[in-house]
Amino acid sequence: MLKPCGLVVALAVLGVGATAPAALAETVMQRVSRTGVLRAGTNRTAKPFSFIDDRGEAFGYSVDMLRLIRDELSQELGRPVKLQLTSLDSDGRIPAITQGKVDIICDASSFTWARDRQVDFSLSYGVTGTRLLVRKDSNISGEPESLIGKRVAAMPGTTNEAAIRRVQPKAQIVLFEERAETYLALQNGKVDALAADGIFLEAWLDKNVFASQFEIAGYPYSREGVACMVPENNSALLNNINYSIASFMQGVVSGEAEDLAIFDRWFGEDSVVPLSQDLRGLALENMRLVLDFHEAIPARSPAPSVKPAPVTTTQPESKPPAGWPSLLN
């Protein structure tokens, strides 16, 4: 850490150095270099992007992105970097970054201009959008008119809530703090529909024993890029994150086995959310579009191997709701 010089100390004593602490504060890269720890936030129920199983272990597409970023930082800094994971609720993400509790968040966060005023976003490494889950015998077609007066479950502060309020102000939004509660509310008839990222709904339908009673209605109400969030004014960190993500996507579209294995683990034929050929093609095309605006990642010269430090997971303050593993696993 930088030490204040005599002039700064003197100014502080005179009462004119009020901005000195901000000027001398560590960047995230400096702190990671000093401590060897990258503090990352993720979500415990955003399957397949990020989730925590009943043993408390973190998994998901976005968690794999965090591991790639951790590896890149280890090489950049020339020392092992430990990935310390903390689970966060959707409405706790931005405060966790702005208050300095975490260095990066990778879950299912999508870009909005309002969020961009408070944090910085990485390149998008996935695409999703708001859709509706309904009972097959409901009269909700997905058209905005069919939502008038309907009770729609959503999580507070999400783009899903905002999308429904935008397309149909006359819908009754029912907010739940836990993702599992939204599914239970729909199953128990407490709401008429559930608004969530389409990929989440596909994952639920693919694994849930009650799936035959439900369907995804209509078309996406929004299209959003999934990205990581970091504190503002940390360009060195963001450069490394973007390099890691671009390198991964370049590997996927060019057929590199290691990168394809990560993508297929979550979206392949036998994965958590098997994508149809059309959706898989769309996902790859979106990666190509992002890469088209950036220089290709050059072949890296062999570098001294730096073994990454292990991942540690900070348990959530409250346990998942009863029945959560059976609902989402």
Image (cartoon, rainbow, N blue to C red):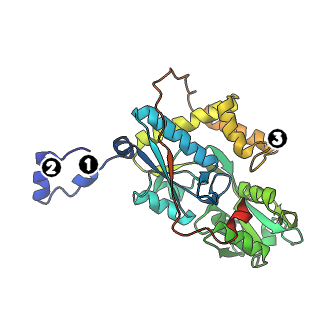
Residue 314: image x %, image y %? 50, 58
Q: Would you say the residues marked 3 and 1 are in contact, meaning their CB atoms lie under 8 Å apart?
A: no
Closer to us: 169 or 265:
265
First-in-chain label (2 vs 3):
2
> Alpha carbon of mark 1 to alpha carbon of mark 2: how far?
10 Å
Q: Which of the 4 image quadrants contains residue 81? A: top left
- SS at circle 3: helix
Residue under numbered circle 3: 277
State the quadrant of the N terminus. Answer: top left
Amino acid type at image mark 3: Gln
Residue under numbered circle 2: 8
> Alpha carbon of mark 3 to alpha carbon of mark 1: how far?
52 Å
Graded by Cα atoms within 10 Å as few (under 14), some (14 to 19) or many (20 or more), the crowding at tag 2 reads some
Residue at 43%, 33% in the rendered image: 76
Instruction: Specify whether residue 219 is in view.
Output: no
Q: Which of the 4 image quadrants contains residue 203? A: bottom right
Q: Would you say the residues marked 1 and 2 are in contact, meaning their CB atoms lie under 8 Å apart?
A: yes
Residue under numbered circle 1: 24
Residue at 47%, 56% in the rendered image: 117
